[in-house]
Image (cartoon, rainbow, N blue to C red):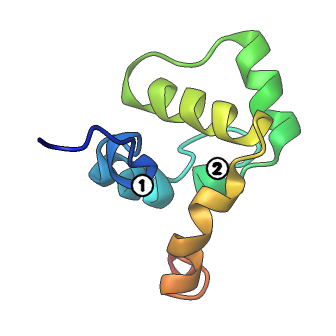
Amino acid sequence: MQEDRFHPCTESAGDSHKLVALAQMRMPFGAHKGKLLIDIPEHYVVWMAGEGFPSGILGEMLRTVYEIKVNGLEYLFEPFRKRSGNYGREQL
């Protein structure tokens, strides 16, 4: 009989490719244009949430960044930053 246990690192992580894409995505406009979405200050993401996120994939990504930041889960991005120093920042 297979043990029915919760494995948070695999079952609740969702699509890891989406997390990688999120960690690499840059803000295409506004006061933080060119910054990685994960590096946009929380107060700005909270403001955007109040104004309404853009439609499409950018809006979905910003909504995810918002949820991660307001719930204190920013540590989820640390593996991406440690992997290559300041992950993706060399492109600024």
Instruction: Check disc 2: other Cα within 10 Å, few if <14, some if 14-19, many if 20+.
Output: few
Whether residue 26 is visible, yes or no, is yes
Relative to the observer, which residue lies in front, 11 or 56?
11
Q: Residue at x 81, y 48 (%)?
A: 41
Relative to the observer, which residue lies in front, 77 or 85?
77
Circle on res. 33? 2
Q: Residue at x 53, y 19 (%)?
A: 54
Relative to the observer, which residue lies in front, 18 or 26?
18
Q: Residue at x 53, y 73 (%)?
A: 79
Q: For this view, does 39 lie left or right of residue 56?
A: right
Circle 1: residue type: Cys
Which quadrant would the C terminus be assigned to in this image? bottom right
Instruction: Give percent across and percent down for residue 82.
Output: 57, 83
Up/down of 39 relative to 68, above or below: below
Q: Which label's residue is closer to the chain start, 1 or 2?
A: 1
Up/down of 28 relative to 54, above or below: below
Circle 1 is placed at which residue position? Answer: 9
